């Protein structure tokens, strides 16, 4: 097995472990809302976007129509536009045909792992990572619908921590090297906390505002480094 | 209830669109320096907001459990790096604390 494939599996396992309990919860909740197994499966298989699926179930129960649900989904998932914009600068030499499949799997966690991978990102790395995420999400959804809460609550809660631990683990090498990265990360978290407390933006927009504001200030912050690199 | 399939397909379309469009707009030309710096800051900005404050409510009944798991990740991650051991270890630490102290 190549080094790339090994690295992708190492990063894929935590995503799988983190997605399964959330997906089980989605399956259980869907059944409780009275939707069919096929619909529940399709939610995870074709939308493949955690938070927005939970929000959609909520809105369905409040009786919101299709237009409102789809618009909310667009708002909630629009952050991926920014994430894909970043990733598009990192995969220069990739064949155009890969773009269509790859774009489908740009979730928060997949994006995070890809963005902190050193050097060029190969299609193989991306597909192994995304398949780990997708298989965990879809199989967990079906398992939750069919089997209900078959895992002990303590275990599902602990498994949920895997996603945060993963984000921290991939961030650490970066913030070890750069105080600026550490400052930007913490500032973004603080801003997000404030925005959530204020509760004035629609679902999903707190994080978009954080990314735009922090990256905007960050771009002034790191411009020195980029200049140096350009002169080398 | 009506079939949800049209709603699901609509949700899929508005989720896939924003994920795909930046790749379609991708050019191999040099991006302006300011935009390049902005894009470079997106990962840390996103991860900061993805971790904080969500992590504090990962184990809502006992934030200390998830907190201890994260401290484990930080120690092992800073000391030895890697992904598997820091992550699986944090799950184990959280699980043990919830089991014995919960």
Image (cartoon, rainbow, N blue to C red):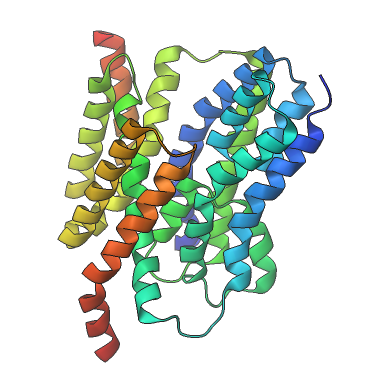
Report the number of discs: 0
Residue most extreme to the right? B2
- Residue A92 sits above or below residue A125 on the image: below
Q: Position of residue B54 (x, y in %)?
A: 35, 33
In the image, farthest residue toward the front: A200
B88, above or below B33, in the image: above
Q: Position of residue A215 (x, y in %)?
A: 33, 61
Up-down relation of residue A17 to residue B80 (above or below): above
> Taking the image as drawn, is residue A21 in sight?
yes
Q: Is residue B18 left or right of residue A13?
A: right
Expressed as whole percent of the image width and height from the top left, the position of residue A143 reads 64, 22
Quadrant in which the C terminus of chain A appears: bottom left
> At 40% from the left edge and 37% from the top edge, which residue is drawn?
A163
Residue at 60% x, 72% y is B25
Question: Up-down: is A69 above or below A184?
Answer: above
Residue positioned 57% across, 29% down in the render? A55
The answer to which quarter of the image holds residue A149 is top right
The one of A93 and A11 positioned closer to us in this rendering: A93
Q: Is residue A7 visible?
A: no
Q: Quadrant of residue B68?
A: top left
Position of B90 with respect to B78 (left or right) is right
Q: Residue furthest bottom?
A: A231
The one of A169 and B1 positioned closer to us in this rendering:
B1
Q: Position of residue A104 (x, y in %)?
A: 64, 53
């Amino acid at each position: 097995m190549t080094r790339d494939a090994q690295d992708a599996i190492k990063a894929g396992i935590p995503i799988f472990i983190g997605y399964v309990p959330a997906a089980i919860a989605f399956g259980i909740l869907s059944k409780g809302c009275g939707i069919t197994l096929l619909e529940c499966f399709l939610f995870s298989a074709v939308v493949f976007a955690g938070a927005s699926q939970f929000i959609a179930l909520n809105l369905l129960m409040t009786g919101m129509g299709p237009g409102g649900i789809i618009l909310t989904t667009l708002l909630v998932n629009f952050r991926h536009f920014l994430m894909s914009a970043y990733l598009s600068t990192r995969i220069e030499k990739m064949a155009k045909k890969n773009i269509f499949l790859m774009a489908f799997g740009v979730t928060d966690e997949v994006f995070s792992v890809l963005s902190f991978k050193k050097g060029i990102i190969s299609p193989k790395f991306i597909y192994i990572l995304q398949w780990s995420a997708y298989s965990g999400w879809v199989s967990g959804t079906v398992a939750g619908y069919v089997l209900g809460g078959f895992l002990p609550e303590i275990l599902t809660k602990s498994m949920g921590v895997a996603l945060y631990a993963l984000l921290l683990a991939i961030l650490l090498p970066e913030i070890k090297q750069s105080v600026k990265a550490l400052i930007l990360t913490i500032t973004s978290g603080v801003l997000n906390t404030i925005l959530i407390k204020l509760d004035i933006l629609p679902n999903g927009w707190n994080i978009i505002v954080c990314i735009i504001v922090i990256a905007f200030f960050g771009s002034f912050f790191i411009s020195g480094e980029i200049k140096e690199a350009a002169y080398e | 209830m009506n079939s949800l399939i049209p709603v699901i397909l609509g949700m899929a379309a508005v989720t896939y669109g924003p994920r795909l469009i930046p790749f379609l707009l991708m050019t191999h030309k040099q991006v302006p320096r300011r935009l390049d710096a902005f894009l470079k800051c997106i990962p840390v900005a996103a991860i900061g907001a993805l971790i904080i404050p969500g992590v504090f409510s990962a184990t809502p009944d006992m934030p200390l459990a998830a907190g201890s798991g994260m401290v484990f990740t930080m120690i092992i991650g800073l000391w030895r790096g890697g992904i598997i051991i820091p992550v699986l270890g944090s799950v184990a630490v959280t699980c043990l604390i919830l089991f014995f102290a919960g």
